[in-house]
Amino acid sequence: MSQQLSRRLALTLAILKPDIVAHPNVVLDIRRKILESGFYFISSKQVKLKSEEAKLFYAEHKGKFFQNRLVSFMSSGPIWAHILCANDAVLKWRKMLGHTKVLKTIYSEPESIRGKYGLTDTRNCAHGSDSAETAQREISFFFPEFNQQQWYDEEHFYFQQGLVEFDSIQCQHLSSNLNKTNYR
Ligand code: ADP
Ligand code: MG
């Protein structure tokens, strides 16, 4: 077995923010890019955050000058939350996203997702966890029913071997594990 195949796949949380969820074609375009980059979608759900929930999710930014506008933006409409899986998923997705500040990113990384679709430094179209620890916490925030340890125990092998198919309706890869748990 090659080293590449034997590496443990990582999980990260991606969020498509309200500014682009309002544009279904953009959502499809971003999902296509995600698939072409070799990510697996482990689970996907559309959520409408309450203001208090957005505040909690972004608790690390409490007191910053942009906190209020960030919280009102993130609770202004539906968002998509996706658990993504790949080798080095956290870094790989952050790289695809581009830097936080869109007004610079549109010049420095025009091909990145934020560079291409971001509107302002706040309305920067998508989120990515910034470390493995953050990913674990953020996945639990949006997918409390998803048992990460169980997924690694039961499903990881099938994903690592590529024994999966993409279900575009659920926006989820399903493994050929016949005893799989339904993580939805
Ligand atoms: P990232 O989303 O890249 O991890 P941060 O965690 O620093 O960035 O910030 C969280 C979110 O807050 C950003 O994605 C963006 O929506 C908003 N934000 C961050 N910095 C600014 C800023 N200087 N001005 C306006 N909004 C900001
Ligand atoms: Mg962050």
Image: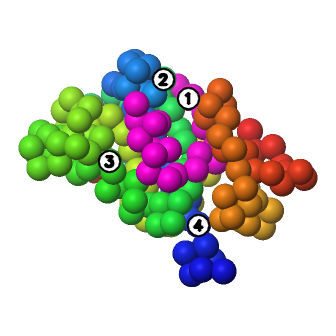
Q: Earlier in the sequence, mark 2 or mark 1?
A: 1
Q: Secondary structure at mark 4?
A: loop
Give the Cα separation between the discs numbered 3 and 4.
19 Å
Which corner quadrant holds the N terminus?
A: bottom right
Query: Does the magenta portion include 90?
Result: no
How far, Cα to Cα, is label 4 from label 2?
29 Å
Distance Cα–Cα, label 2 vs label 1:
6 Å
Q: Is residue 158 left or right of residue 27?
A: right
- The answer to whether 53 appears left or right of 62 in the picture is right
* Residue at the disc numbered 4: 9
Q: Which residues are magenta?
A: 29-56
Within 8 Å of ligand 1, the CB of disc 3?
A: yes
Residue 92 picture location, percent across and down? 40, 59
According to the picture, the residue beneath numbered tag 3 turns out to be 97
Location of residue 115 in the rendering, given as x and y in whole percent from the top left corner? 21, 40
Give the label, 4 or 2, closer to the camera. 4
C-alpha distance separating marks 3 and 2: 20 Å
Q: Nearer the viewer, mark 3 or mark 2?
A: 3
Secondary structure under the numbered disc 1 in the rendered image: strand
Q: Which mark is residue 47?
A: 1
Which comes before the other along the chain, label 3 or label 2? 2
Q: Indicate which disc residue 37 carries.
A: none
Residue 131 falls in which quadrant of the image?
bottom left
Q: CA distance from mark 3 to mark 1?
A: 21 Å
Q: Is residue 45 above or below residue 160?
A: above
